[in-house]
Image (cartoon, helix red, strand yellow):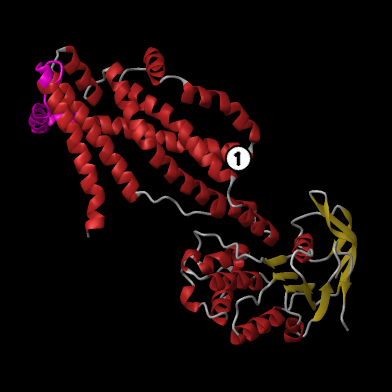
Amino acid sequence: MIILENITKRFEGRTVIEGLSLTLEDGGITVLCGASGIGKTTLLRLLAGLIAPDGGSIVSDARKIAVSFQEPRLVPWLTCKENINFVLSEGEHSSKKADDLLTALALESHQNDLPSTLSGGEKQRVSLARALAADADLLLLDEPFTGLDEELKHRVAALIKGANARTHTLVISHDPRDAALLGATLLRAESTPLSALISPL
Amino acid sequence: MMKRLKKPLTAALSLLFWVGIWWLISLLVGKPLLLPTPWAVLKRLFRLTATGAFWQTIGTTLLRISAGLLSALALGLALALLTVRVKTVGRLLAPPLYAMKATPVVAVIFLLLLWFGKQIVPALVTLSVALPIVFSAAEAALARTDRTLLEMARAFGVPTRRVFWQIKLPAAGSALLAAVRASVGLAFKAGVAAEVLAVPRYAIGTAIFESNLYLYTDTLFAYALAALLLSALIEWLVLKFIPKGESL
């Protein structure tokens, strides 16, 4: 479980998040929707432990975190498979996990290719495969469905559900319909600065 | 086709123009001891290339300069890696590196000649000229190693050792290639200048010095031309075969 209590985050004098409280239940999937610049990615970075809140507290029992960022962030000199293995523990390198995920995301022919040879959408899928391969307690996915056709979208949704993150899976999306696709709880971010997340139901 | 030929054609015409000017001045001066004609220099160079001593001279100079350049690469990378990890090292290294960069090469050559043997001075001078360039390039690349990649590694909890070997070091390697491209021409010129003053055995610089001493002006020009062609060849090889490095 993850409990955020009265979180505040400021950037250069601008308050992005103010007094936000949120509980993410074990094993659940949440889709967070809202306009651009409202603070969704800041919330994701707080949960990933990449930035610290200026106020409030985050209590999390997630030990292993995996993130698929909005931009792919692939290491340019590592092949697609090596990029996935980069985040896995030494023992997991020889497993078929990377191969299986690349195949599931229609990237099997690119296993040994460098990111520079891939299209933007393909890079994003490798980034997603990397996050899914990590077998994380907390899975944070920023716009994982962007640029996917319907068939791949359903495949990705199945993979996210199948990843079964022990603590929680948080998906940031601009499309509220993604919640239904994932069988997830939908939360909307509407206020600026972000102070509450509204459940439409 | 014409478009592709335009660049080398312009370069050749421009070269011919300046060779023509040289020819004209040498004819006007009319004293081969002061300024030989390009034809006389070319003839001399061809005669020199037929001797074993010429190639021994060129080879030994290349060896000395390569030794200096390779040492600069190894030392520059090691110091840059250390600086990125321990900021104090960077502050400590700043004055000597600035001194290496700013001190006139001739002064450095004379100082090194005081302390070391003349055989080793050209390599040391090459090292001192290339080291600050290599260090700055490697340090800058290491420092700017894409923060988003480092952040990704941090989010996933990737071990520090793996981040070093798979992100930081390749990024530095990429910078080293850029440093080699930037420093090789300069290092070669400084190395030959050091040879002129140190006069070691078998060296282009020594040949230039001795030709000047005995007023063999055509030989002096021939060796200077050989040095120029060699420098151009090295730069061309470096530009052609050493990649610019993968951008982050």
Q: Position of residue A10 (x, y in %)?
A: 82, 53
Q: Position of residue A178 (x, y in %)?
A: 73, 82
* Image-based side of A35 in relation to B33, left or right: right
Residue at image point 56% right, 73% down: A121
**Host chain of mark 1:** B
**Quarter of image, res A30:** bottom right
Please give the count of numbered marks on the rendered protein. Answer: 1
- Identify which residue, A13 or A22, lies in the foreground: A13
Q: Can I make out residue B19 in this image?
A: yes
Residue at image point 29% right, 44% down: B236
Q: Which residues are magenta?
A: B28-57
Please say whether residue A84 is one of the residues in the magenta stretch.
no
* Magenta part, dominant SS: helix
**Quarter of image, res A129:** bottom right
Q: Can I make out residue B120 in this image?
A: no
Q: Is residue B22 above or below residue A129?
A: above
**Quarter of image, res B108:** top left
Q: Is residue B13 above or below residue B132?
A: below
Residue at image point 27% right, 33% down: B62
Which image quarter is the C terminus of chain A in?
Answer: bottom right
- Identify which residue, B6 or B107, lies in the foreground: B6
Identify the secondary structure beneath mark 1: helix
Type of residue at label 1?
A: Val
* Mark 1 Cα-neighbour bin, 10 Å: few <14, some 14–19, many ≥20: some
Q: Which residue is mark 1?
A: B84
